[in-house]
Image (tube, helix red, strand yellow):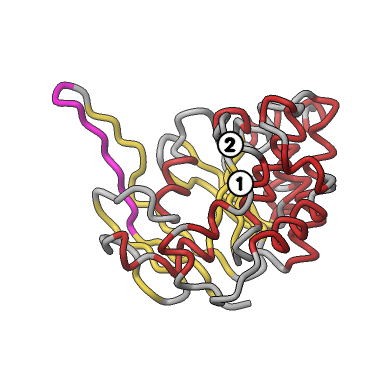
């Protein structure tokens, strides 16, 4: 495997004039090509902040991030086209992440119209053909392209969000709590879909979740976060079967399958 992401000394402090929040403190992390990394921890542990910094959607207070050997920290947005095309995100709530007044046939190819992303793609990309391809990938009929988001179930809306992320043929998919807003009955379907897509498209996957069973299903490597720091990381089976920290053991004990 080759190194895809590298982060060193990542620190993120938020202040509003009176209150200070240390969201991340001196985090170091590498993600290799083809890896399936799960970032787990309680709410407020810094998981989402970390992936936002990796994707250059926020700037660290201190520290640096590299993608494919190129530093992205502090670069102006106009120089990040290579990152925007290669790294796509799927967010927690598909209802809020889809524009309600746009039809699905316009939502899914939306990344292809981005000025930054467009520069990284072949000039002759056929948006309609790509729409058909990714809708097939997520098991949605092409005739659904004329519908609006409110006409779909939560699970279908998340499939639409995944299809949109796949449209520019990314190398990395970052999924931030991808099934936590879904009914229990459809979570397994979406997780299985993600597994299949990552395998068939050769993607690197980064999953943020507080649900250790979701991460175990999707990931081969785990990073455990507590209070803005990575307190443990390693191969998934090692972390699950022989956790090194009390905090990780506490998280596992909260999952019925892992309770003593």
User: Could you tell me which secondary element the residue under label 2 belongs to?
Assistant: loop
Which quadrant, please, contains the N terminus?
bottom right
Residue that badge 1 annotates? 106
> Is residue 248 found left or right of 151 in the rendered image?
left
Image coords of residue 213 (percent x, y): 75, 37
Q: Which of 166 and 259 is in front in this view?
A: 166
> Is residue 162 found left or right of 87 in the rendered image?
right
Which quadrant, please, contains the C terminus?
top right
Residue 224 vs 83, above or below: the answer is above
Q: What's the residue at 58%, 36% (across, down)?
A: 102
Q: In which quarter of the image is residue 182?
A: top right
Q: Are marks 1 and 2 in contact (CB under 8 Å)?
A: yes
Question: Magenta stretch containing residue 17, yes or no?
Answer: yes
- Residue 102 image label: 2
Q: What's the residue at 69%, 59% (across, down)?
A: 128
Q: What's the residue at 77%, 60% (across, down)?
A: 133
Image coords of residue 140 (percent x, y): 82, 45
Image coords of residue 187 (percent x, y): 79, 33
Q: Give the extent of the magenta segment.
A: 9-18
User: Could you tell me which secondary element the residue under label 1 belongs to?
Assistant: helix
Q: Which of 108 and 191 is in front in this view?
A: 108
> Is residue 79 found left or right of 119 in the rendered image?
left
Q: What's the residue at 29%, 50% (across, down)?
A: 60
Residue 21 vs 229, above or below: the answer is above
Image coords of residue 171 (percent x, y): 60, 67
């Amino acid at each position: 495997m080759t190194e895809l992401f590298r982060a060193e000394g990542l620190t993120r402090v938020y202040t509003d004039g009176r209150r200070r929040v240390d969201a991340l403190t001196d985090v170091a992390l590498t993600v290799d090509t083809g890896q399936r990394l799960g970032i787990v921890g309680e709410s407020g542990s810094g998981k989402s902040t970390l992936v936002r910094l990796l994707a250059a959607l926020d700037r660290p207070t201190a520290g640096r991030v590299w993608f494919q050997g190129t530093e992205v920290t502090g670069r102006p947005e106009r120089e990040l086209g290579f990152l925007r095309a290669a790294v796509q995100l799927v967010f927690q709530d598909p209802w809020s992440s889809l524009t309600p007044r746009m039809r699905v046939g316009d939502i899914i190819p939306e990344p292809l119209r981005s000025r930054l992303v467009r520069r990284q793609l072949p000039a002759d990309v056929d948006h309609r053909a790509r729409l058909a391809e990714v809708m097939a990938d997520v098991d949605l009929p092409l005739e659904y392209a004329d519908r609006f988001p409110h006409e779909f179930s939560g699970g279908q809306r998340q499939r639409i969000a995944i299809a949109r992320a796949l449209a520019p043929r990314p190398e990395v998919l970052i999924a931030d709590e991808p099934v936590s807003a879904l009914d229990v009955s459809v979570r397994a379907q979406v997780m299985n879909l993600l597994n299949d897509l990552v395998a068939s498209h050769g993607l690197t996957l980064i999953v943020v979740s507080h649900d250790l069973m979701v991460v175990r299903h999707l990931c081969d490597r785990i990073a455990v976060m507590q209070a803005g720091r990575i307190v443990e990381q390693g191969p998934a089976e090692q972390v699950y079967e022989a956790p090194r920290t009390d905090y990780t053991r506490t998280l596992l004990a909260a999952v019925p399958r892992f309770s003593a």
